Image (cartoon, rainbow, N blue to C red):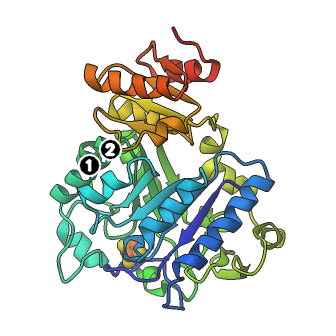
């Protein structure tokens, strides 16, 4: 199990009828305890030799969790991947750029391009629904900062007939996930009136299948017994056949112990995250200078401990001093910055290597086998 969903808060500025990110207890964990949950997950990954572990930070709306940035730093310091699922309404360019090296993927939940539909769903704050323009602005900033973009759309009676193809094409997600509206006993009972048939869901998926290279369709039952969830109180929960059940506290018990009594469906888990698990992951501590946003995004998937730097972006020589190797993609960096990096690396006896290709796979091979002129 290499992906855990840590729901940091029950609070959200939206009120979607079918929201399943709701929890009875309203108080969020203090930072120290949230970090203990991360410690527990990291221990589990380490014990099980999982090198590509990811912690997905969700809510409610995770940007309403007071200690979100500190927690991301903490996860990053472990060399684990952090991703975030957000409604995007509070995302700013500044925040996205701050997360540049630390967040592997931002998932935006976007259920309609039509403001009236969003209002009816409850995806609005003070009667204001998100606009296409806002979504374009946010997604452009995510792409610019080399962070992977995922879009999640819950398909219900309210959007099942909508044509969202143009909307998706403008946002250019790296991954697009459609989720059939799901009813969880006692959590989102109001969602029942928005439920759709499998056939209607399949038709929506078929219509939008070509809007992204990686499209995933999750029928309502596929979340059952496979979505590994830690609630805002640090308790491990599972959607066990349409009902949330709690199996123990990650603050009190080792995660491996808790998981030993959880009825997880590995088939469902693997079909959701399998592709991610099969990817080769390298843990070398390297600094990579230069390269365009899409190239950086591709490399980030394989080099979990790499740090990426754009032209002029070097605030401390310590990052070079602590690196195993320095790699330079000479496109998109100036000659003077290149000189500064090479001088610092030589002064600290850190080997400097050069990418000889523009293609992501060849560059990964190069780093793996240290093939460089
Ligand atoms: S934006 Fe997400 S967390 Fe907030 S109410 Fe809607 S579904 Fe729930």
- The residue located at (25%, 76%) in the rendering is 124
Q: Residue 74 in the image: state x and y as whole percent.
A: 54, 62
Depth check, front residue: 199 or 268: 268
Label 1 CA crowd tier, 10 Å (few <14, some 14–19, many 20+):
some
Give the residue at x 39% y 68%. 156
Q: Mark 2 sits on what residue?
A: 145
- Across and down, in percent, residue 266 comes to 74, 56
Label 2 CB sits under 8 Å from any ligand 1 atom: no
Residue at image mark 1: 141
Indicate the quadrant containing the N terminus: top left, top right, bottom left or bottom right.
Answer: bottom right
Between 172 and 320, the one nearer to me in the picture? 320
The image position of residue 199, as x and y in percent, is 48, 58
The correct choice, above or below, for 226 with respect to 182 in the image is above
The image position of residue 372, as x and y in percent, is: 53, 12
Quadrant containing ligand 1 reads: bottom left
Q: In which image quadrant can residue 113 be found? A: bottom left
Q: Quadrant of residue 15?
A: bottom left
Q: Residue at x 68, y 45 (%)?
A: 51
Secondary structure beneath dot 1 equals helix
Q: Which mark, by number, is residue 72?
A: none
């Amino acid at each position: 199990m290499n992906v855990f969903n840590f729901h940091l808060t029950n609070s959200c500025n939206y009120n979607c009828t079918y929201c399943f990110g709701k929890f009875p207890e309203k108080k969020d964990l203090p930072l120290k305890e949230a970090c203990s949950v991360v410690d527990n997950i990291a221990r589990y990954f380490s014990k099980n030799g999982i090198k590509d572990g990811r912690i997905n930070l969700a809510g409610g709306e995770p940007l309403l969790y007071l200690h979100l940035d500190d927690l991301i730093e903490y996860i990053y310091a472990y060399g684990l991947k952090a991703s975030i699922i957000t409604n995007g309404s509070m995302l700013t360019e500044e925040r996205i750029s701050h997360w540049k090296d630390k967040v592997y993927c931002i998932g935006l939940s976007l259920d309609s391009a039509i403001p009236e539909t969003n209002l009816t769903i409850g995806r609005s704050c003070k009667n204001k629904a998100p606009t296409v323009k806002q979504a374009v602005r946010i997604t452009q900033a995510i792409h610019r900062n080399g962070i992977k973009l995922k879009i999640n759309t819950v398909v219900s009676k309210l959007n099942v007939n909508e044509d969202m193809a143009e909307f998706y094409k403008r946002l250019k997600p790296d991954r697009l996930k459609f989720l059939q509206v799901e009813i969880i006993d006692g959590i989102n009972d109001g969602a029942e009136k928005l439920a759709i048939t499998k056939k209607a869901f399949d038709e929506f998926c078929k219509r939008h299948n070509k809007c992204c290279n990686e499209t995933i369709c999750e029928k309502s039952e596929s979340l059952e017994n496979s979505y590994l969830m830690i609630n805002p109180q640090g308790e491990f929960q599972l959607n066990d056949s349409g009902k949330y059940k709690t199996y123990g506290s990650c603050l009190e018990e080792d995660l491996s112990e808790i998981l030993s009594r959880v009825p997880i469906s590995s088939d469902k888990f693997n079909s959701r995250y399998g592709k991610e698990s099969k990817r080769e992951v390298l843990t070398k501590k390297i600094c990579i200078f230069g390269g365009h946003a899409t190239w950086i995004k591709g490399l980030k998937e394989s080099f979990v401990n790499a740090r990426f730097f754009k032209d002029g972006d070097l605030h401390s020589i310590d990052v070079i001093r602590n690196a195993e190797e320095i790699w330079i993609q000479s496109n998109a960096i100036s000659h003077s910055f290149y000189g500064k990096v090479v001088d610092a690396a030589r002064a600290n006896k850190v080997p400097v290597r050069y990418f000889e290709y523009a293609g992501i796979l060849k560059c990964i091979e190069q780093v793996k086998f240290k093939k460089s002129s």
